[in-house]
Structure formats: C-alpha cells, structure tokens
Image: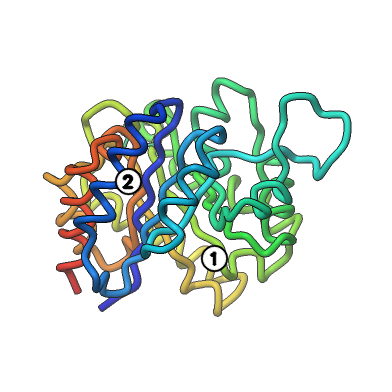
Amino acid sequence: MKKKLIVANWKLNGNIEMISNYLKFLKNNLLSNLNKNIIVIAPPNIYLERTYQSIKKINIFLGAQNVDVNLKGAFTGEVSVLMLKDIGVKYVIIGHSERRILHNETDNFVAKKFHLIKNSNLIPILCIGETEKEKKNGKTQKVIEKQLNCIFQILGEKAFRNAVIAYEPIWAIGTGVSADPEYVQIIHKFIRNYIQKNDSVSKNVIIQYGGSVSSLNTKEFIQQEDIDGLLIGSASLHAKEFLKIIKISCSID
Ligand code: PEP
C-alpha cells in the first residue's frame, strides 16, 4: 500500500456553520484505518484554529493555503510561518497558480517561502504546472524544470526531502476538465526523475495531482504509479464528496 496525501484546499470559501457541519460529518464517518493515506484540510486562515480544534483528535492534519515571506515585523495583513506553526499547521500550500497569476508571485518569491517553511520544520506543498499555451507549445517540461530549479538554487540538492510537490496544470484547475491520468503519470515520472538527478533520496518525494479531481476520477489518478495523492479544490468543499474521495483512495494499494 503506497503512502498517499489527500489535501482539501477550500480557497476563499466556508463559514462557521459550514465548517462545523463539515467537520462533524467527517468526524462521524472517517475510516478508522486510513491505510497510509494522510488527510489534510486547508481552510481560509481565519478558520485555521477552529478547524484545528475539531481535527486534532482525529486523523486529519491542518494545512494553510499561503504564508508570507517574512517571519515578523511591519508587514500589515500578513501571516508568518511561525504563527501557522504556533496554531497547529503542518502543511503549507505555496505557489498555487491563483497566487502566481493574481498576486504576481514569481518562482523566486515562492522559493523563498519554501525555504522558510522547511526551516520551520513544516511541510511545503509546492504547486507547479504549465498554462494551456505552454502545453500546446510543448513547453511543459521546461516550465517545470524552471520552477524546480529555483528551489534547488536556494536550498541545494536535498531541497525536496520532506516536501510535497503538487502538479497542477493550470488549464485543469477549476475547469471541470481534468488532465488525462496517463498524461499526468508521464509528467510525474518526469518530475521524479528530474529530482532524482539531484538527490536520489528525494526521489521518494510525494507528488500529488490537482485539477478538477472528483470522486468520479479519483481511482484513475490514484492507480497511476507516480501519483501519490491529490490536491482538491471545488470537490473538497462538500464533506460527502470529500469522504468519497478519501474512501476510494484508501481502497487502492
Ligand atoms: C486547486 O485549486 O488546487 C484545484 C485543484 O482546484 P479544483 O479541484 O477545483 O480544480
């Protein structure tokens, strides 16, 4: 049974009532044996602590959707990795395409966050992936190399030990049209080989897929040899649907 990481990214969604019902449902229905599956929920920052209080006694970990590049000081409106750690966060999503596109976050900027997260002994979930145009022009691998190289440049060859990569082709996010699982397998293999060239231990890095995953396509993705988990947006907003995805993943060796 391979280790799989299933992450719910709620983005800018949810309220106290929704979260309370959602977590109650999961608490009552989550499998007692997750078969090496690790489950993470990443709510909006303002609900992190509330979520942590509900999940800390069950087998679910807390994730954040972003973090600042500074640890403390005069940075109004920001949240640091030390604060996230302080309230129970274990995983931090960085480099999501929505942040790269809507907040102009560059590879270099994302690499600085990756560094801070690793230094604080939290686990970065680094989102990478190509646009539709880049895919059409046959540039997917070049884009991914560039995104990974930035991390290697700052952290050196062991950069990806105890880190997670989420391959999220931008054209598949929130579109309802997921990538082809066999295509994703090829890209994941490429990512693993590329990392292995720098560090043979890091070849065991968890590589998730994200982009319009639902309970209808979970099985096809998880069955692929190099897909070690899923990063799920829209479908993770519904507790029943998220539980279905977890159950499918737990049933696959
Ligand atoms: C995401 O935003 O990381 C994502 C994968 O979204 P969705 O599942 O809605 O495509």
Distance from disc 2 to disc 1, alpha carbons, whole Å, reads 36 Å
Q: Amino acid at mark 1?
A: Ile
Q: Residue at x 60, y 46 (%)?
A: 146
The answer to whether 184 appears left or right of 182 in the picture is right
The residue that disc 2 covers is 23
Element marked by disc 1: helix
Q: Residue at x 27, y 69 (%)?
A: 34
The spot of residue 233 in percent (x, y) is 34, 36
The answer to whether 137 appears left or right of 236 in the picture is right
As drawn, the label of residue 195 is 1
Q: Nearer the viewer, residue 238 or 192?
A: 238
Q: Earlier in the sequence, mark 2 or mark 1?
A: 2
Q: Quadrant of residue 1?
A: bottom left
As drawn, the label of residue 103 is none
Q: On the rendered image, what quadrant is the C terminus found in?
A: bottom left
The spot of residue 117 in percent (x, y) is 68, 54
Find the residue positioned furthest to the top.
Answer: 102
The answer to whether 176 appears left or right of 143 in the picture is left
As displayed, is residue 225 above or below residue 46? Answer: below
The spot of residue 218 in percent (x, y) is 19, 51
Q: Residue at x 64, y 30 (%)?
A: 105
- Colouring chosen for the image of the structure: rainbow
The spot of residue 222 in percent (x, y) is 23, 60
Find the residue positioned furthest to the left.
Answer: 216
Q: Badge 2 local density, few (<14 within 10 Å), some, or many (20+)?
A: some
Q: Residue at x 31, y 28 (%)?
A: 174
* Image quadrant, ligand 1: top left
Element marked by disc 2: helix
Q: Nearer the viewer, residue 39 or 95?
A: 39
